[in-house]
Image: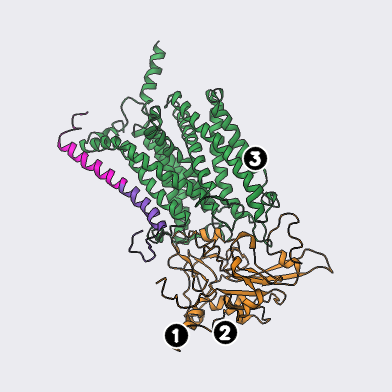
Amino acid sequence: MLPFSFEWAWDMGHMVFMGGLWYALTILGLGMTYCIIMAAVDTAKGKGSHNH
Amino acid sequence: MDSALIPEGVKRCSFGKFILWIVIVGAVLLWGVVAMLLCWFKGLNQTNMNDAYGFALWIWADLAVIALGGGAFFTGLLRYVMGKDELKNIINYAVLIGFICYSSALLILGMDVGQPLRSWFIFWHANVHSMLTEVAFCLSCYFAVLTIEYIPLILENRQIDRVPFFHNLSHNMHGIMAIFAATGAFLSFFHQGSLGGTPAVLFGRPFSFREGVLIWPWTFFLFTWSAAACGPCFTILVTWITEKITRKKLVKQNVIMLLAKIAGWMLATYTVAKIIDTWYWATVTAPARGFNFMDFYSNNPLYGPWILVLEIVICGVIPSIILITKTGRKSSFLLISAVLLAVLGACVNRWVMVLQVMAVPVLTFESWFMYFPSWQEIATTILPVAYGIILIMISYRYLPIFPQEQEIEEEKNASIFV
Amino acid sequence: MKEEHKHVKTKKYGMVIDLDKCTGCGSCMVACMSENNVPFKKDETNKLDSITWLRIYKLTNGKKFPETDICYIPRPCMQCEGEHGHAPCVSVCPATATDYNHETGIVSQIYTRCFGCRYCMAACPYHARYFNWWDPVWPDGMEKSLSPNVSPRMRGVVEKCSFCFHRYQLAKNKAYAQGRRELKEDEYQTACTQACPAGAITFGDLNNHNHAVYKLAKPDNKHGGRPRNPNAFRLLEKLGTNPKVYYLSTREWVRRAGDNYIKDEGKLEHH
């Protein structure tokens, strides 16, 4: 999974495969981070408190 | 008692009745949990698996629930990426069903491996050539996507939504949901495919082995295709069952019709591809390895040509014809029969690609291996069903799963007064 | 790590089993279990959940007396090479717990790495891989007689014949200590080979033209190791698993039992 595990090799298989995994994880991680930060910013601006 | 938690403008049964059903289904769940603990603490000797049947009921259940949970990714793809806007009225439920299916699959996998505490090895020491590695990666990532898609629904609960941060979080997550849905579709394409590749790369097993293109056997594409076809059928089926139990319409018919039509065309094209694949396998691939077609369907008490007829004709051709014709879709009986058959077809296909693969003798001096699961295997396979029912019950009661419910109710009331 | 043995000639350890000599006595099985600390249960009648790295199958020609004939086939792990080391089981293992050693041609199994998914077992057409359904338990005192050179396996992992790889390591150590890099033929022999009273099992390097295994099977290494000896065959040759265990028999029905044929295909091919 990481280049620290001893069977890691910088070959095409690892680059494509692990690249795909890290690409997906990055999108999910960044997406959620964005949502949480924006939610905090919106809340600080007082959005969302008017409903109900 | 819990009316403050129930979405506004909708009616739910009494709290007592709700709890009674939770307890009844919970008892089944508990039975499964006992069996699960037995398997974890005493080991897999609690199952009827053996060295010939290393893959059995659990792997079938995994493949089947993942295929049926495919409704989430395909509906998401249609809704968020292809812009089929009507599907927003069923996407929540598709996501919930997908979430249940995928969490069940992960739970079953957690029981199925001999050393569950080492499961992380599949990530850490990943063999990039193994189909199962790709399955594990995409499955867990896609489960994360489904969780991300399910969270805004939870946040929309009447009481949780009052908290400004949660309200904003839900709003922001909805805002970029297309990105998550697209990532989910990408991941799903690969893990559904890899599950198809799992038996097909076994070149020591002529029954499941398939040729293909580059590193992908034909079944890689067939499994993704059938999941995209049968997943939405399962969503329609579960929606119908929910409507029957709650005794009310929850999703407008035009939404169901659209999804059924798309699923129908996916199923029809899949069935054609499956027939071609089976024909090529029976006449070229298997004979090249010394096997006659009938070697796979004779001399045993269960697997005969009937299973092929059931899978391809009864559960493939027939539902395809019903779903692609307007008359077929319009008849409620035919529509539900068709989606039921399509769901059964996906389950039969996964059964064949797991259990029949193990059953067929390859060495000439061995005979068919037959297997019947132990009660622990059965209980742990029913466990996710009970868990799914409970999660649906709770979600239906407290979350705005069906956006059209209130509107349909109002229209119904209005028509009564007219 | 991968390059350090490049100066040493690549070996392809393999086995030739003369089925005309095998009496089915089971000495090889006993030797194997004892040598490799193979766990056993009180009741071993169910062969589908008991571990036998080397298993003997009994075959008959299906004819009535006086034409009836039987043959015993000892089946260790075939140490398949597949194409370029892609053995059926190796490429499927998700956690790299099994590996094809290009230096020896032996398929390894790393017990502490295996997490018991059993995909390799599904992949192996020879049923040479076994799962530890139970914790290994030895009768009181017997654990003292276990071999210190082979690690016992825990519940929930897969194990299989290793061609007594620990013997290879010991022989290598000894040779290195004596300043040698190459092993002599008799320095590395498996337990089953040495235990066979009929001398039916021969073991050695299939790449070495001086070794008995090469002379017996005459493998055509340019064509996937197919035997050139007309009496030699491998199990399930057509699947492309490229095994390193060869069988010898002068009887056509025995050779034919090694593979599947469609209808009357190849009936005369061994004549």
| Residue type, numbered disc 1 | Tyr
Report if residue A32 lies within the magenta region. Answer: yes
Q: Is residue B185 visible?
A: yes
Most foreground residue, B86 or B163? B86
In the depicted view, which residue is nearer to us: B112 or C4? C4
Q: Position of residue B247 (x, y in %)?
A: 45, 26
The chain containing the residue under callout 1 comes to C
* Colour of chain A in the image: purple
* Residue assigned mark 3: B309
Q: Which chain is orange?
A: C
Can you give x and y, in whole percent of width and height, for residue B399 in the image?
34, 34
Q: Colour of chain B?
A: green
**Residue C176, disc:** 1
Q: Measuring 56% from the left and 63% from the top, which residue is drawn there? A: C82
Q: Residue at x 22, y 36 (%)?
A: B163
For mark 3, give the secondary structure.
Answer: helix
Q: Is residue B93 left or right of residue A48?
A: right
Q: Which residues are magenta?
A: A27-52
Residue C214: image quadrant is bottom right
Residue C186's disc number = 2
Seen as rendered, the residue at the extreme bottom is: C178
Q: Vertical placement of B19 versus B290: above or below?
A: above
- Mark 1 on the same chain as mark 2: yes
Viewer-nearest residue: B325 or B110 = B325
Q: Give the chain of mark 3.
A: B
Q: Is residue C20 located in the magenta-colored stretch of the structure?
A: no
Chain containing mark 2: C
The kind of residue on which mark 2 rests is Asp
Q: Nearer the viewer, residue B375 or B103?
A: B103
A20 versus B324 height, above or below: below
The correct choice, above or below, for B48 with respect to A33 in the image is: below
Image point 76% across, 61% down: which residue? C267
